[in-house]
Image (tube, grey):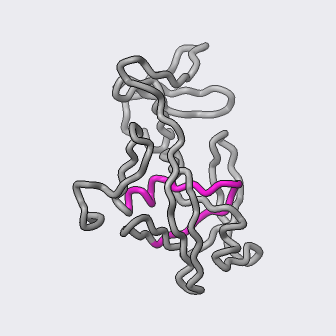
Amino acid sequence: MRIFLLQKFGVSAVVGNWLGTRSCVFLPEYAANLPIRHVPEGVKMITEATAEQGTPVGIIYANITLTNPYLKKSVTVRAMVDTGTTHMIVTADTARQLGFDLDETSTYSLTVADARRVRVPRIQPVEIRFHDRTYLTEAAVLGDECLMGVLPLEAMDLVVDPKLQRVTPNPAHPDGPVFRA
C-alpha cells in the first residue's frame, strides 16, 4: 500500500492505495504509524473504479429501530450506512420522537465531511436494533438523514455487502457478535 499525506484547501488527509483503488482516505491521527510521503504539488485526490473492480458502490440503507430505554420510546428509521462516519447520527425530529429535549442535552464537537468542526446535541442512551443485534450508545443530532457509522456496525458485527448493496449480520457469527478481550 502506498501512503501519501495530502494537504490541500486547508484539509489534511492521508491517502492510500487499497486493494487497487485510489479512494481510501485515512485521517492523519489514525495513520500515525504508516510510512507517509508527501504528494507532489498539483496532484488531485480522485475516486475511480476500473473495469476489474466492477461498478462503483451506491448508497446503502438499513432499516433500524432506535429506542430510548428510559422512556421506552422507539422509532424505526431508514438510516444511510456510512462507513466514513464513526457514530450514529440522528435528525432532530428523530431525537424528539425518542423523547429527548434538545435544549437540555449535552453537546460535543464533530468534524463533518468538509473538515469543519461543529457543535451538535448529543443524546444518550440510544439503543440501536438491527435484526437480532443491539448496541447501546449515544447519538449526535445533525442533518436531515439518519446515518449509521462504523462503531454501531462493528459492535453489532454487521457486514456491509457493497455488491448487493445491503447490510447483514456477519454470517460467520450467526448467534450474535463475538467480543474479544
Q: Quadrant of residue 133?
A: bottom left
> Could you tell me which residue is drawn at 63 percent across and 34 percent down?
11
In front: 91, or 75?
75
Does the magenta-highlighted stretch encompass residue 139? yes
117 on left or right of 89: right
Could you say where residue 87 lies in the image, as x and y percent from the top left?
A: 52, 58
Residue numbers of the magenta segment: 136-155
Q: Is any part of residue 32 visible from this angle? A: no
Location of residue 54 by image quarter = top left
Q: Give the number of marks.
A: 0
Residue 80 versus residue 135: which sits nearer the camera?
80
Residue 11 included in the magenta stretch of the image = no
- Residue at 73% in and 73% down: 102
Is 38 drawn above or below residue 62 in the view shown?
Answer: above
Q: Residue at x 57, y 54 (%)?
A: 147
Up-down relation of residue 33 to residue 9 (above or below): below
| Location of residue 84 with respect to 137 vertically, above or below | above
**Image quarter (top left, top right, bottom left or bottom right) of the C terminus:** bottom left
Q: At which x and y percent is residue 138?
A: 55, 69
Residue 78 appears in which quarter of the rendering?
Answer: bottom right
Residue 105 in the image: state x and y as whole percent. Answer: 69, 75
Residue occupying the far right of the picture: 103
**Residue 162 vs residue 92, the one in the foreground:** 162
Q: Is residue 23 visible?
A: yes
Residue under the image location 61 percent in, 57 percent down: 146
Q: Position of residue 142 (x, y in %)?
A: 68, 58
